[in-house]
Every structure is written in C-alpha cells, then in structure tokens.
Image: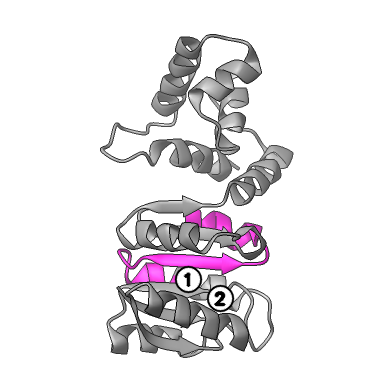
Amino acid sequence: MRIVIAEDSALLRDGLTRMFTDSGHEVVGAIDDAVGLKELVERKDADLVVLDVRMPPTHTDEGIRAALELRSQWPDLPIVVLSQYVEENYASELLAGDLGGVGYVLKDRVTDVGQFLQTVDRVGNGGTAIDPEVVSQLLARTRRQKPIAGLTPREREVLGLMAEGRSNAAIAEQLVISQRAVEKHVKNIFQRLRLAPADTDHRRVLAVLRYLEAR
C-alpha cells in the first residue's frame, strides 16, 4: 500500500516509516502537521493514511478534524487514527458513518508490531479496527446523556458487553443465560437499530455506534 503518515513526533514518524517499509509497504509522504495533509494525499495518490489526533499548531484536534475532512472528500480512503487520547466529539462523528476502512487505535495499547501491521492491513482492505477502550468511553458518554430508544434493559446490557468486545459465549457467561438467548438479543438489537445483514462482521460495531448516535 501507498501510505501517508501525519505525526508530529519525529521518533514515532520515523519508526512508523521504517516499520511500514520493512513490511513491504511504500511510505509516499510523512509530515509533522495536518496543514498540507489533504494536498499530500491527493498528490501522492495514497492508499491509506495514518495520523495522530493532536498535532501543530494547537496540539488539540487538528488530526481528527483532518480525518473527517479526508473521509468527506474521499469516503473510500482508509484511515487509521493513532492517538494517545479518545477525542469523544470527533471520534463519535468519525465512527458514526461508514466504518469500512476506519481504524482508531490508542498508542499506549499498541504493544505488538505484528498485530498493529495486521490492523493496518485490515483497515487498508476495507475492514474496521476500533480499540475497545474507544468504544467503551463513547458508550459511557452517551449513557450519561440519553440511552437509545427502543431497546429493552436486557438488550442495552447485551449491547454494553458487545462494546467491550465480548463474544456471544462470553456475554452468556456474564449474564448467566444461554448462548441462544444472547443470539436472540443480538438479533433483536440489529433489527431495532435497522442494521441489515451484510457479508462483513461490522454489524456488532455498528450497533454500538448507533447507540452512540442517539442523543
């Protein structure tokens, strides 16, 4: 893949460049701010963008806002947000749309290079990679505001455990119910949130994000 990196830390930027190059990818651009990111992506015909959330000049939300702009102009452009923080407002907006080709990874949870490269490859191929902690924080924020209408208390409980990344079997064990009952709750959640069957496994993540949209 042709990758563009936007990261203000020179050490991390160089490290990412070497890592991607060593794994067979081509880093076609690496910058330390988001100012010229859109032009660079277009000029270099990038296949994927890896960017930080907080970059110059204010070190607040330049990166995540740039990600939103890129997805607005190129909806099919894969983007991996690599951040130290969960920017709730912008993260919710970024993850509220089509999740194909979107990744949100927390830096301090990246402990395995091979696993991170697999994550990047998955996003580059149109998949989704969202750190469970990101989903958990966004879910907690929404719970403080307004729970999604239409779900029963048990369904919201199941959805909360889905947000933690638990399988149906793990949810069944936690709630002390049968796995078949969990499958029924999950099916009902999909139906109530109008998530049609698909060939991908995005519906579990989409279900959590639809919850986040309900305000």
The answer to whether residue 151 is visible is: no
Residue at x 59%, y 46% (from the top left corner): 132
Q: Which residues are magenta?
A: 69-97
Image location of residue 188, percent across then percent down: 44, 20
Residue type at the position of mark 2 = Gly
Residue at x 44%, y 85% (from the top left corner): 37
- Label 2 close to label 1 by CB (< 8 Å): yes
Image location of residue 93, percent across then percent down: 52, 57
Instruction: Please tell me which residue lies in front, 189 or 47.
Output: 47
Instruction: Please tell me which residue lies in front, 177 or 74.
Output: 177
State the residue position of label 2: 63
Up-down: is 13 above or below 142?
below
As drawn, the residue found furthest toward the right would be: 144
Q: How is the image coloured?
A: one colour
Query: For numbered disc 1, what is the local secondary structure?
Result: helix
Residue at x 57%, y 43% (from the top left corner): 212
- Magenta residue check for 119: no
Q: Could you say which quadrant of the image residue 124 lies in?
A: bottom left
Q: Is residue 178 left or right of residue 136?
A: left
Up-down: is 84 above or below 187?
below
Image location of residue 3, percent across then percent down: 37, 77
Tag count in the figure? 2
Residue type at the position of mark 1 = Ala
Label 1 Cα crowd, 10 Å radius (few <14 / some 14-19 / many 20+): many
State the residue position of label 1: 67
Residue at x 40%, y 88% (from the top left corner): 29
C-alpha separation, residue under disc 2 versus residue under disc 1:
6 Å
The answer to whether residue 189 is visible is: yes
